[in-house]
Image (spheres, grey):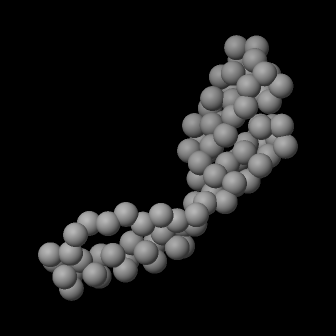
């Protein structure tokens, strides 16, 4: 998550490591938190609305067809490149 990435970045700084000069940091969730720290965190932003719609569709399908086999759904995320990876 972005929160963990921020924590990692803070710990690296406390250890004397420089982000992004020595090490890149990235998160996953696309929260606003990633933009209010310095350096700003690169993050993978999942399509939350689409995830919710797809989950609701799958639940309804399962209710209507309990014998339906489980399946995977792959959704595209958006990469937000920021300062923590040298962008």
Instruction: State the residue at coordinates (46%, 77%).
Output: 53
Whole-percent x, y for residue 24 in the image: 73, 31
Q: Residue furthest left?
A: 67
Quarter of the image with the N terminus is top right
Whole-percent x, y for residue 26 in the image: 67, 40
Q: Nearer the viewer, residue 28 or 37?
A: 28
Query: In the displayed structure, would residue 20 be above or below residue 35?
Result: above
User: Residue 63 sits in which quadrant?
Assistant: bottom left
Instruction: State the residue at coordinates (52%, 73%).
Output: 50
Quarter of the image with the C terminus is top right
Q: Nearer the viewer, residue 72 or 1?
A: 72
User: Residue 4 sits in which quadrant?
Assistant: top right
Left or right: 56 as drawn, with respect to 40: left
Left or right: 6 as drawn, with respect to 66: right
Instruction: State the residue at coordinates (77%, 37%).
Output: 84
Whole-percent x, y for residue 72 in the image: 37, 63
Q: How many marks?
A: 0
Query: In the displayed structure, would residue 30 be above or below residue 7?
Result: below
Q: Residue furthest bottom?
A: 64
Query: In the displayed structure, would residue 42 be above or below residue 74?
Result: above
Instruction: State the residue at coordinates (30%, 76%).
Output: 59
Q: Is residue 71 visible?
A: yes
């Amino acid at each position: 998550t972005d929160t963990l990435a921020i924590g990692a970045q803070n710990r690296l700084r406390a250890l004397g490591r420089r982000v992004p000069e020595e090490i890149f940091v990235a998160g996953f969730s696309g929260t606003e938190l990633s933009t209010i720290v310095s350096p700003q965190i690169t993050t993978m932003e999942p399509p939350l609305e689409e995830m919710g719609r797809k989950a609701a569709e799958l639940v309804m399908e399962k209710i209507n067809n309990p014998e339906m086999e489980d399946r995977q759904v792959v959704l595209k995320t958006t990469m937000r490149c920021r300062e923590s990876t040298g962008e």
